[in-house]
Amino acid sequence: MAALALVSFLAAAFVAGFIGFALSLERSESTLTVQADGVVVLTGGSDRVYEAGGLLARGQARRLLITGVNRATRGHEIAKLLPVSRELFDCCVDLGYRARDTIGNALETRDWAQARGLDRGSLIVVTSNYHMPRALAELSAALPEASLYPFAVVSDHVRVEDWLDDIAVTRLIAAEYCKYLYVALRNRLLERSPAAPIGSAAVAEPR
């Protein structure tokens, strides 16, 4: 009986957490006026890259990292996707080819930030709205002394507000929620481990 009650409690907590997760996702485009040290965009769609380029072009950061670039993609191809001059691209855009997943994006961003002296600075994080919670969790673990500003990109292809009506969206958000829970639990366990201390970056409120 006690085991059944525990299972029921955990199931209810999971469902309640999922609902809260789905409702917390941004429904409209982010607006930021913050001036940051850098912008990092996690690849996965040209709209993400374009929005990140816009932040750089508007002078809201000094450098841009595009992490997770396909190894077959060349710099001149990326340059065509960005609303920036070729001069700005050549001086201030860095391409990361190592990352293959979100934790890889975080580690690649950490290495880039350390090399550029930005690991204790402020970074705008650009990715899709449904991917943002997990991206921030991974980046917070990798860059515990950085200030992170989320810039969520809303896609016409994934309408998160339809999570109750569109089974494909429900599955996508459910998968992201499960992955987010795993990362959050892993980070909590690592925080408590004296062998592998991990801090928590400050996730700043958009302004």
Image (cartoon, helix red, strand yellow):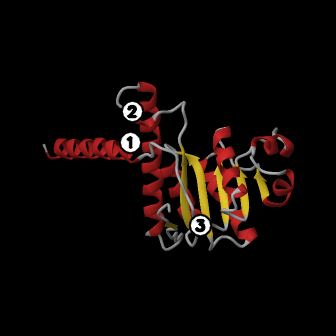
Q: Is residue 121 left or right of residue 194?
A: right
Q: Nearer the viewer, residue 121 or 67?
A: 121
* Residue 183 percent across, percent down from the top left: 48, 53
Q: Nearer the viewer, residue 141 or 127?
A: 127
Amino acid type at mark 1: Ala
Labels 2 & 1 near each other (Cβ < 8 A)? yes
Query: Which one is closest to the eye, mark 3 or mark 1?
Result: 1
Res 100 visible: no
What is the C-alpha distance between the residues marked 3 and 1?
Answer: 26 Å
The secondary structure type at the circle numbered 1 is helix
Q: Which numbered tag is attached to residue 143?
A: 3
Mark positioned earlier in the residue sequence (3 or 1): 1
Q: Is residue 92 left or right of residue 43?
A: right
Q: Quadrant of residue 80?
A: top right
Name the residue at 73% across, 62% down.
Answer: 63
Amino acid type at mark 2: Trp
Mark positioned earlier in the residue sequence (2 or 1): 1
Label 1 belongs to which residue? 22
Name the residue at 50% across, 62% down.
Answer: 207
As displayed, is residue 125 above or below residue 69?
below
Q: Nearer the viewer, residue 180 or 90?
A: 90
Label 2 belongs to which residue? 163
Q: Quadrant of residue 62?
A: bottom right
What is the C-alpha distance between the residues marked 3 and 2?
Answer: 31 Å
Res 121 visible: yes
The secondary structure type at the circle numbered 2 is loop
As displayed, is residue 178 above or below residue 133?
above
Q: Which numbered tag is attached to residue 106?
A: none
* Residue 206 percent across, percent down from the top left: 49, 60
Amino acid type at mark 3: Leu
